[in-house]
Amino acid sequence: MAIDKATVAKVAALARMRVPEAELDALTGELGQIISWVEQLAEVDTTGVEPMTSVVAVDLPRRPDAVTDGGYCEKVLANAPQGMAGFFAVPKVIE
């Protein structure tokens, strides 16, 4: 893909970067090399390759999904201005 100075200036504007006119030629070459490298990556055959989240195959530790705390509704509602059937009661705000 060919990149020209106008495209580099537009990309810089979209990225909210102020690029002096003198640096546009250098950035044109660099951006062109980056895009050609990405195009080269698209040619790699990745069929059968599993997606991965890390370069190291590690299973994350998991804990059992069990209730380990709670069961003291009365203590929680003790500071509430009003409670009803084990829940906080609030005034109606929509009529």
Image (tube, grey):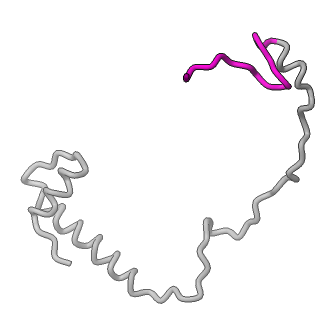
Residue 84 or residue 29, whichever sits in front? 84
Residue at (14%, 63%) from the top-left corner?
7
Q: Which residues are magenta?
A: 79-95
Q: Main secondary structure of the magenta part?
A: loop
Residue at (40%, 80%) from the top-left corner?
41
Residue 22 or residue 53, whichever sits in front? 53
Give yes or no for residue 93 being in the magenta stretch. yes
Give yes or no for residue 30 being in the magenta stretch. no
Q: Is residue 37 above or below residue 70?
A: below
Residue at (21%, 47%) from the top-left corner?
17
Q: Position of residue 85 (x, y in %)?
A: 85, 25
Q: Position of residue 15 (x, y in %)?
A: 25, 50
The outermost residue toward the front is 95
Q: Is residue 52 above or below residue 94?
A: below
Residue 24 or residue 7, whichever sits in front? 7
Q: In the picture, residue 70 is in which quadrant?
A: top right
Residue at (34%, 75%) from the top-left corner?
38
Q: Is residue 6 above or below residue 72?
A: below
Q: Is residue 42 above or below residue 25?
A: below
Classify residue 72 as left or right of residue 50: right
Classify residue 1 as left or right of residue 82: left
Q: In the picture, residue 52 is in which quadrant?
A: bottom right
Q: Position of residue 64 (x, y in %)?
A: 88, 53
Residue 71 or residue 95, whichever sits in front? 95
From the image, which quarter does the C terminus lie in? top right
Q: In the picture, residue 1 is in which quadrant?
A: bottom left
